[in-house]
Image (spheres, rainbow, N blue to C red):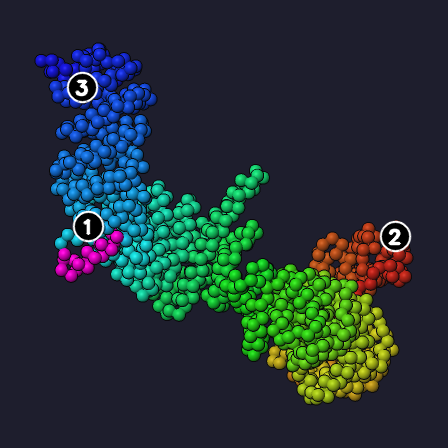
């Protein structure tokens, strides 16, 4: 009954968990009542629970005490030991004998109890006591008891508790492992015996203990022989046959400990290899292979076992993948690892990734096509893991993918379908866009490995997907490189962080460039694959994006817009040789990828200082052999860029294949040794001592590099120092009697021309050396570079200009691409903005007018396109520089050229550039605004031009037009005496008169018309000849016949849409009327098919009344057109007609002047606006009506109104022509007596005095000679 009550109380206390506030009955359970009163109070715990150690020592081994009470006492002691560690340890340790006795009692209780919960409590209490007491004697005592227990145990059946205690004890106190092995070595035999005991709990405990023993390096070393000879096969067998999860986990735990040591890894794997060989031979029983055991665990559905087995595989492979991977591969472990990638467990996927990464180091992994089997699982796993938040998993998956992509043999295609290849690209694109830098870094490496020819599906190659992938990679790199660095001065730590950030950026940029370089290599490789040129499945009408050409252009644009800016920005912070090596190799490969853009790309690179950048890299890093690869890449890049720049130059002629081959060989040998900085290179270039062949080649290459840099405005070399160095170089060549290659000579001359300052000039010896070098070159175009300063260089030194000026100017104009036509179309009054090249040319012409003679020779001897450019330049120069007197110089030289040309071409003068020369001569003549006496040279020139015209036909417009202009200007822009002499010379040329007659006839024919402008000149010349002959009574050698009816018809019914032609015909008709048709030069003949004039018209002969009226109507119609020049010509002709009529029949003259239509005509002209009557042609017309008293046309009141308007007008703003016409109108009104108002008469008198001929000089004269539509026109000739 008492026992049952005790048990109930203990159970209640146990249920309460032994809290601090125990009741009296519960505390009584902890004490042994019959003996407690004898115990010293020192053994009583002073805090709750009030446990007495002496009672516990007597109570726990007591057979009569219930198991429940014992368990409760142990539980309370454990809790007290946890809560009040120091008090309990002091309580136990105050007497060593009691302490040892208590431990022995607990160990005995452990060994004798079959209840597992009590056993666990005993073990836990013992472990806590050992760890808290830290008394070696107690520990040794416990170990001895355990040893003795195991040794005296006939069977391993009851050894579970002891072995478990040992395992946990060694786990709690790791140093016991060494002591246990050293002092209790024969215990291993019992453990080995227990390992084969058919109880997996015992086996599990033994494996646990082994695992703790082997965790100590010293113990492991001492147990190595034991493992080799006995434990290894037994352990592998146990592991292979394990059924419970506890045993499997403890086996794996022991295996993990063993696999930490190379020795045991070798033992286990060697044993496994022997077992496999034996199994393959005859299947020897009892031999177990570790790969097969782990494979079995991988096949289990237990995630923990799968993860643990993966860890074990990883542990083996870490030691030596090359040595041990093949065993796992032969066991098909990779296949199951790939299967595990489909798991949802991040830990399992992670561990599988690790195993596969290590297995990928073995070539057998690829040759047995495990990657082909598992690549889809890798891609799908990567896609799934990127949706998770575990960035470490992302990194590991990308690392595996990169390893597979990198190590996969080219002959074994990894992606068997385009869909799988596309999935891989999209996964990499998503990964590289990750905001986590470490993930993006691994993704960039994987992309770099992915960009391999054998990894791409073909056909079709998914160029669009590749482009998207590269864009994502480059954009991620650009995004990272644009993150601002924290450069605030916060001390050393901030500086280190900044350096670390720059280094991190450099690594990421390096990986990105490696990927881009692989993409470029891919494009190069696809160039030789016909099937890779474009996607055959693309619709014909679709945009061609999936083509190699589009992909190649994308690479060029991406490099230009992203790669180059990123590298340049990074190079401002630091320069990494490996990064620059890859970068320059990319630029080099782009020359091959996009061959049609290589010249343009090279020019852009040169203009962006890439020559300077590459030379600085070579000088900084390539002076030692440690960066030989960088030196090779730099030299190769410079080599191809220089060849590209020289092959398609913008400012010089393309080289021949022979020249290009010579330059190629020169650069190939001379570029690699160049690794000095700019000052050192200039010193080397200036060396006047004897220079050997290799050194001379280096000098040549340096000059070519500087030349190409300067051409593209990269002037990184100081001009003054370079100017001196090049001179020394040329003198060195002269001293050694060497002739430089044309490209080197071109570079030297160009650099001298560009670097020559305003105050610096070449020494005579250098100029002589240059001339000697140039004379040894077959053609100057081989050394010519188009630049204004180079032209100035040749023209500023007389020795060079006299020998090479003609050819240099010819080359200059052949390269000029300015809009010369636009300049030529601008009227002389306009001021167009000149191109810089022309402005420079004009400056040279002003400083040395003798260059004009060379330009004249060019007009004569050069091809037509060049000669035309020269002509336009001369025209514009002469127009803009009227102060420079070049007339006599040009005319004299032109006369020589013209004489020579007439001798050479004879009867066919239209050949060559004669029209251009004549056009220039006309321009020179036009510049003479004042009347000048014609000297003997001018008369000779006039004779030669007229002689030239006589040899031409009406269709030779290009020659006749400027020639007629010259003849016309010669007649009208000279003194009266010279006019008479010039007219006599021209009239003596019968061929010229015959030509004019033919051309006048062509005015009213539709076939063979030479053009309106030339017809205008012909009529004007005829009118001029007729006037000069009539006024000077000159001898006529050939008459000129004109049909009067056709002339009148042409004026009455003009077919040509040219007012100037009508004005010219009117000028001719006015001259004829003024001469009363009595000219001995011009014979006006009636039409052969015209009607016979009536008898009453004889008084007007050769005109008829109907012809007069028809002519008047024609003049009225022409006046209505309101063209100023044409209107004045019409009024002048009408004046001459009325004078002619009045002299023969006054009635007819008055009848014509009083026609009612004249009033309508006058008011139509006056309707042009306010003060429109103050136009010279209207004033002259009104003067004519007043003179012939046509009051029905212009009444007295209207005359008064006009006079009043004239009085009110500001006469100072009127032109001389208008003032003369107004004065004539006043005088005519005054002479007729139409002034009735006295005030108006006085005002008129004042006006007449102000308008006296002397007052005209106050007004600026209007230029009389003009060129209208290419026709030379004298305004006074047409209008007066």
Foreground mark, 3 or 1? 3
- The location of residue 463, given as percent across then percent down, is 38, 60
Q: Which residue is mark 3?
A: 59
Toward the viewer: 198 or 395?
A: 198
Q: Can residue 1138 be seen here?
A: no
Q: Residue at x 25, y 49 (%)?
A: 225
Q: Is residue 1214 magenta?
A: no
Disc 1 is placed on an element classified as helix
Pick whichever of labels 1 and 2 is earlier in the sequence.
1
Q: Which residue is mark 1?
A: 233
The answer to whether 650 is drawn above or below residue 1215 in the figure is below
Q: Is residue 1241 left or right of residue 826?
A: right
- Look at the image and give the residue range highlighted in magenta: 267-284
Foreground mark, 2 or 3? 3
Foreground mark, 1 or 2? 1
Q: Can residue 687 be seen here?
A: yes
Q: Quadrant of residue 515?
A: bottom left
Pick whichever of labels 3 and 1 is earlier in the sequence.
3
Other residues around mark 1 within 10 Å, as few (<14) / some (14–19) / many (≥20) = many
Toward the viewer: 919 or 253?
A: 253
Q: Residue at x 29, y 30 (%)?
A: 137
- The location of residue 580, given as percent across then percent down, is 52, 58
Pick whichever of labels 2 and 3 is earlier in the sequence.
3
Q: CA distance from mark 2 to mark 3?
A: 159 Å
Toward the viewer: 275 or 1148?
A: 275
Residue 1243 has which mark?
2
């Amino acid at each position: 009954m008492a026992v049952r009550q005790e048990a109930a109380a203990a159970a209640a206390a146990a249920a309460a968990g032994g809290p601090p506030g125990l009741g009296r009955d519960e505390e009584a359970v902890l004490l042994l009542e019959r003996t407690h009163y004898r115990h010293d109070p020192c053994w009583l715990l002073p805090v709750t629970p009030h446990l007495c150690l002496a009672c516990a020592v007597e109570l726990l081994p007591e057979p009569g005490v219930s198991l429940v009470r014992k368990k409760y006492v142990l539980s309370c002691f454990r809790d007290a030991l946890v809560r009040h560690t120091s008090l309990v340890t002091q309580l136990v340790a105050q007497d060593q004998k009691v302490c040892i006795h208590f431990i022995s009692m607990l160990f005995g209780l452990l060994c004798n109890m079959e209840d597992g919960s009590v056993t666990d409590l005993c073990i836990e209490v013992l472990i806590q006591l050992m760890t808290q007491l830290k008394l070696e004697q107690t520990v040794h005592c416990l170990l001895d008891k355990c040893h003795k227990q195991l040794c005296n145990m006939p069977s391993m059946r009851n050894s579970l508790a002891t072995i478990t205690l040992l395992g946990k004890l060694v786990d709690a106190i790791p140093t016991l492992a060494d002591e246990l092995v050293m002092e209790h070595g024969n215990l291993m035999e019992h453990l080995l015996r227990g390992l084969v005991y058919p109880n997996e709990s015992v086996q599990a405990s033994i494996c646990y203990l082994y695992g703790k023993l082997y965790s100590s390096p010293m113990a492991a070393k001492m147990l190595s022989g034991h493992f080799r000879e006995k434990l290894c096969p037994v352990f592998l067998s146990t592991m292979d046959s394990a059924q419970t999860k506890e045993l499997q986990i403890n086996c794996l735990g022991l295996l993990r400990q063993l696999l930490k040591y190379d020795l045991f890894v070798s033992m286990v794997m060697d044993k496994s290899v022997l077992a496999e060989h034996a199994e393959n031979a005859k299947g020897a029983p009892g031999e177990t292979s570790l790969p097969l055991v782990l494979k079995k665990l991988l096949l289990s559905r237990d995630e923990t076992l799968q993860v643990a087995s993966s860890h074990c595989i990883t542990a083996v492979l870490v030691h030596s993948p090359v040595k041990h991977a093949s065993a796992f591969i032969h066991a098909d472990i990779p296949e199951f690892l790939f299967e595990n990638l489909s798991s949802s467990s991040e830990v399992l996927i992670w561990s599988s990734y690790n195993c596969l990464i290590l297995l990928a180091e073995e070539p057998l992994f690829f040759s047995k096509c495990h990657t082909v089997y598992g690549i889809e699982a890798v891609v799908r796993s990567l896609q799934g893991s990127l949706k998770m938040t575990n960035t470490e998993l992302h990194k590991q998956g990308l690392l595996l993918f990169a390893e597979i992509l990198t190590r996969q043999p080219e002959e074994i295609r990894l992606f068997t379908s385009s869909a799988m290849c596309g999935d891989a690209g999209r996964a990499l694109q998503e990964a590289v866009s990750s905001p986590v830098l470490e993930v993006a870094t691994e993704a960039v490496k994987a992309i770099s490995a992915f960009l391999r020819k054998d990894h791409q599906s073909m056909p079709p190659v998914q160029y669009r997907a590749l482009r998207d992938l590269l864009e994502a990679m480059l954009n991620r790199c650009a995004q990272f490189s644009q993150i601002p660095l924290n450069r605030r001065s916060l001390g050393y730590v901030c500086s280190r962080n900044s350096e670390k950030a720059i280094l991190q950026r450099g690594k990421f940029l390096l990986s990105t460039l490696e990927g881009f370089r692989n993409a470029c290599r891919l494009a190069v490789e696809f160039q030789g694959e016909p099937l890779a040129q474009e996607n055959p499945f693309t619709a014909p009408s679709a945009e061609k994006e999936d083509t190699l050409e589009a992909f190649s252009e994308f690479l060029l644009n991406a490099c230009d817009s992203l790669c180059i800016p990123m590298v340049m920005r990074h190079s401002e912070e630091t320069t990494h040789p490996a990064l620059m090596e890859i970068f320059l190799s990319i630029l080099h490969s782009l020359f091959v990828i996009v061959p049609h853009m290589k010249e343009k790309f090279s020019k852009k690179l040169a203009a962006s200082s890439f020559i300077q950048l590459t030379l600085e890299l070579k000088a900084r890093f390539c002076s030692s052999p440690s960066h030989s690869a960088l030196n090779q890449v730099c030299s190769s890049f410079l080599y191809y860029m220089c060849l590209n720049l020289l092959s398609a130059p913008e400012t010089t002629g393309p080289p021949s294949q022979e020249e290009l081959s010579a330059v190629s060989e020169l650069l190939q040998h001379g570029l690699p040794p160049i690794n000095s900085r700019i000052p050192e290179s200039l010193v080397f270039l200036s060396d006047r001592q004897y220079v050997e062949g290799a050194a001379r080649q280096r000098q040549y290459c340096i000059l070519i590099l500087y030349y190409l840099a300067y051409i593209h405005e990269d002037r990184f070399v100081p001009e003054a120092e370079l100017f001196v160095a090049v001179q020394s170089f040329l003198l060195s060549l002269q001293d050694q009697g060497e002739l430089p290659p044309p490209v080197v000579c071109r570079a030297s001359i160009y650099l001298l021309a560009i670097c020559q300052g305003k105050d610096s000039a070449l020494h005579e010896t250098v100029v002589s050396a240059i001339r000697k070098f140039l004379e040894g070159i077959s053609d100057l175009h081989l050394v010519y570079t188009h630049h204004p300063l180079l032209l100035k260089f040749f023209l500023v030194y007389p020795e060079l200009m006299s020998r090479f000026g003609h050819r240099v100017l010819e080359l200059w104009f052949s390269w000029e691409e300015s809009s010369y036509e636009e300049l030529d179309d601008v009227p002389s009054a306009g001021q167009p903005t000149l191109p810089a090249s022309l402005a420079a040319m004009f400056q040279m012409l002003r400083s040395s007018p003798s260059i004009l003679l060379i330009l004249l020779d060019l007009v004569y001897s050069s091809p037509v396109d060049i000669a035309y450019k020269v002509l336009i330049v001369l025209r514009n120069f002469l127009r803009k520089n009227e102060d420079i007197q070049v007339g006599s110089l040009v005319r004299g030289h032109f006369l020589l050229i013209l004489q020579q040309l007439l001798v050479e071409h004879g009867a066919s003068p239209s050949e060559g550039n004669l029209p251009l020369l004549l056009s220039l001569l006309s321009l020179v003549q036009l510049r003479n605004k004042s009347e000048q006496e014609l000297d003997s040279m001018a008369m000779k020139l006039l004779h030669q031009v007229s002689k030239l015209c006589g040899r031409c036909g009406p269709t030779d417009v290009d020659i006749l037009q400027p020639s007629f202009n010259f003849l016309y200007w010669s007649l009208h822009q000279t003194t009266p005496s010279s006019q008479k002499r010039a007219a006599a010379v021209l009239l003596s040329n019968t061929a010229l008169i015959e030509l004019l007659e033919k051309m006048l006839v062509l005015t009213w024919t539709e076939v063979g018309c030479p053009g309106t402008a030339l017809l205008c000149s012909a009529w004007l010349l005829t009118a001029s000849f007729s006037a000069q002959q009539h006024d000077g009574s000159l001898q006529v050698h050939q008459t000129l016949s004109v049909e009067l009816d056709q002339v009148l018809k042409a004026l009455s019914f003009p077919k040509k849409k040219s007012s100037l032609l009508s004005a010219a015909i009117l000028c001719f008709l006015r001259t004829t009327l003024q001469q009363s048709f009595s000219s001995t030069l011009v014979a006006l003949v009636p039409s052969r098919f015209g009607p016979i004039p009536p008898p009453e018209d004889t008084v007007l002969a050769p005109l008829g009344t109907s012809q007069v009226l028809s002519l008047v109507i024609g003049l009225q119609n022409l006046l209505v057109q309101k063209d100023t020049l044409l209107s004045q010509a019409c009024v002048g002709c009408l004046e001459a007609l009325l004078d002619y009529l009045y002299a023969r029949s006054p009635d007819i003259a008055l009848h014509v002047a009083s026609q009612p239509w004249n009033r309508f005509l006058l008011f139509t002209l006056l309707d042009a606006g306010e003060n429109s009557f103050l136009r010279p042609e209207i004033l002259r017309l009104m003067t004519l009506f007043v003179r012939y008293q046509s009051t029905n046309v212009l009444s007295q009141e209207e005359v008064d109104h006009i006079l009043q308007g004239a009085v009110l007008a500001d006469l100072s703003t009127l032109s001389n022509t208008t003032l003369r016409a107004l004065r004539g109108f006043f005088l005519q009104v005054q002479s007729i007596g139409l002034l009735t108002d006295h005030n108006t008469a006085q005002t008129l008198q004042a006006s007449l005095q102000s308008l006296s001929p002397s007052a005209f000089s106050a007004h600026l004269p209007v230029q009389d000679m003009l060129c209208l539509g290419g026709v030379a026109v004298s305004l006074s000739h047409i209008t007066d």
